[in-house]
Every structure is written in structure tokens, then in C-alpha cells.
Image: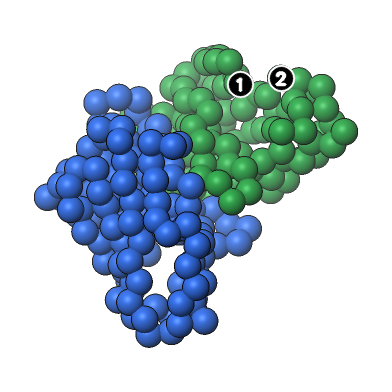
Chain colours: A blue, B green
Amino acid sequence: DADVTQTPRNRITKTGKRIMLECSQTKGHDRMYWYRQDPGLGLRLIYYSFDVKDINKGEISDGYSVSRQAQAKFSLSLESAIPNQTALYFCATSDSQLSQNEQFFGPGTRLTVL
Amino acid sequence: LAKTTQPISMDSYEGQEVNITCSHNNIATNDYITWYQQFPSQGPRFIIQGYKTKVTNEVASLFIPADRKSSTLSLPRVSLSDTAVYYCLVASRAAGNKLTFGGGTRVLVKP
């Protein structure tokens, strides 16, 4: 969805480095999510936020942190990257007032940790 | 969140109808059934959602029997561009739109 953007699209980094992935949306949605996807597998929820002051851990939050700087921005940080965090990361948004379970996904960030 | 089971992969040919069945035996009263499509290196895209009986849109149809313990996504007259992974999800508004993506069904459409 072009209304959900992620930067960078690709990133190669080294073990121990701090990395920030950013997500912005122009859909005006209140809810935002971060997922990771490993090759051949489904998506796993890392963190989610229902509003600017709301942050919740997902299924696999260890090693990650997030910040909801504004309704439109939700960033994911890896404080000290490790190789098994190599994955495809997706940001998504949804509107709590609209369709039950429809989320809108960004194009993804491919992260490689060497 | 209700767990879902769906086939790992399916092959089809252009012009055929593809039906993917998903089992969700412990679906709760407030749960909705939602299907997403994902192309390689892209984020998932919402296809269709339903609660019971039949739902149809411009992309697909969703059939849900009375007991709601399974559902079938039907893709009419598929083309090569329908090759993708299809995910069946079950969730309720009480879950706060938290979605659990399983492994999905990899559909390969052949010429």
C-alpha cells in the first residue's frame, strides 16, 4: 500500500550495531504494527500500538524496541543487532473504526545482519 | 486466537477455479475469518473477510458453513498473476486487530 512507507528498503549491517527502521502512513489510521517474516514462513508480530501513547509487545519482542512518535510514525529499533534478526520486516496499519481485521502493509525492509 | 490449518501448497492452471480450505475448529463466537494474499517480497494484502455463509467481492468468494469450523476461499478463473501465498486468519475485534499469520498456502498457477 503506497500510503504506508518504510525506510530503508534494504539494509546490511554488522552484529552489535544499532539499527532503526521507520514507518510512516498517510491513511490516518490509529493502529500500527511491526512484523518480521523469515524465509518460507508466515509473519510474526513484534510490537503493536493502538494509539500514540500505547505500546504493546507482540509474539517476539525480545531484542526489539519501538517508538510511536506521532500517529503517523512508528519506528522499530534493534539496539544491538544479531544475525538471527536477519529477516524481512513489515509495518502495517489499521483503523479501529473500520473493517474488522483489515491491515494495510508497507513494502517491507529487508535487513541483513552479518 | 483460534489456530488455523491450511494446505502448504496447491498447483493449478490458468483459467481454473482454485479453492483453498482452512480449518479453524476452535473458532470463537466473536471471531471473523479473514484471507490475505502475499506476493514475493511484498507485504500481505487483504482479500476478503466473513463471519458466516458466503461473501463475494471482485477478487474472490468466501464460503463459511453453519458450524464455522472451516472456510473455503475460492479464486475464480486464476491467472499467472494469482501465484502467491494465501493466508487464512481468524481473529476478533476483542483481539484488537492482532493477527496471527500461519504458514499460508502457496498457490502456483501454471500456464
Quarter holding residue B58: top right
Contact (Cβ within 8 Å) of mark 1 with mark 2: yes
Q: Is residue B69 left or right of residue B17?
A: left
Residue A21 place in picture, x, y as percent? 36, 61
The picture places residue B75, in percent across and down from the top left corner, at 68, 24
Q: Dot 2, how many residues are within 10 Å of its Cα: few (below 14), some (14-19), or many (20+)?
A: some
Disc 2 is placed on an element classified as loop
Q: Is residue A97 left or right of residue B7?
A: left
Task: Check disc 2 and report the residue beneath it.
Answer: B76
Closest to the observer: B23 or B39?
A: B39
- Residue A13, percent from left and from top: 46, 77
| In the image, residue A72 above or below residue B62 | below
Q: Residue at x 26, y 66 (%)?
A: A65
Circle 2 marks a residue in which chain? Answer: B
Q: Please report the residue visible at 77 percent of the width from the left and 33 percent of the height from the top.
A: B80
List the single residue furthest toward the right: B111
- Can you identify the residue that label 1 sits on? B60
Q: Residue furthest left?
A: A53
